[in-house]
Image (cartoon, helix red, strand yellow):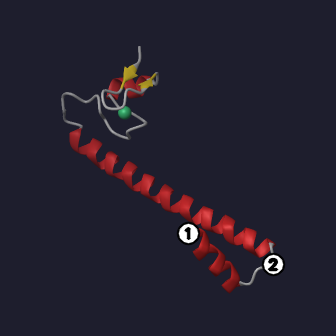
Amino acid sequence: MAFTCPRCGRTSHNPNDEREGYCGACHDWTGDQQPGTNRQWRTVVKNMTKAIAHLEQENNALRAENDRLRWALGKGLTESEAADYLAKEGD
Ligand SMILES: [Zn+2]
């Protein structure tokens, strides 16, 4: 058995996803046609999942900036030169 997300069309072969109607790509219970007693609990987990996704985005942004700064440091740029470089790159 498999669960195919009605929203994005992704198919999951994870038995938990199938049972819950959960789509890992959408981070949502897109297959949940009959909200049950677990609805509130699911909302809590859903909001937590969203918060984690947001943190991961910030984490990736910080990591990317850190990589660029480390590159600048390796090139022997001063802090202000590195800042200029980053500002130019952002254009
Ligand atoms: Zn989906």
Label 1 element class: helix
Q: Residue 37: image x %, image y %?
A: 19, 35
Tag 1 and tag 2, C-beta contact below 8 Å: no
- Which is more toward the observer, 74 or 5? 74
Asked if residue 80 lies left or right of residue 16, the reply is right
In the image, the residue with mark 1 has its CB under 8 Å from the nearest atom of ligand 1: no
**Residue 80 found in image quarter:** bottom right
> The N terminus is located in which quarter?
top left
Query: Residue 69, relative to residue 3: is it above or below?
Result: below
Mark 2 burial class by Cα count in 10 Å: few <14, some 14-19, many 20+:
few
Q: Amino acid at mark 2?
A: Gly
Residue annotated with mark 1: 90
Residue annotated with mark 2: 76
Label 2 element class: loop
Residue 48, disc: none
Real-space CA distance between mark 1 and mark 2, rounded to the nearest whole angstrom? 20 Å
Query: Residue 42, relative to residue 64: is it above or below?
Result: above
Ligand 1 visible in quadrant: top left
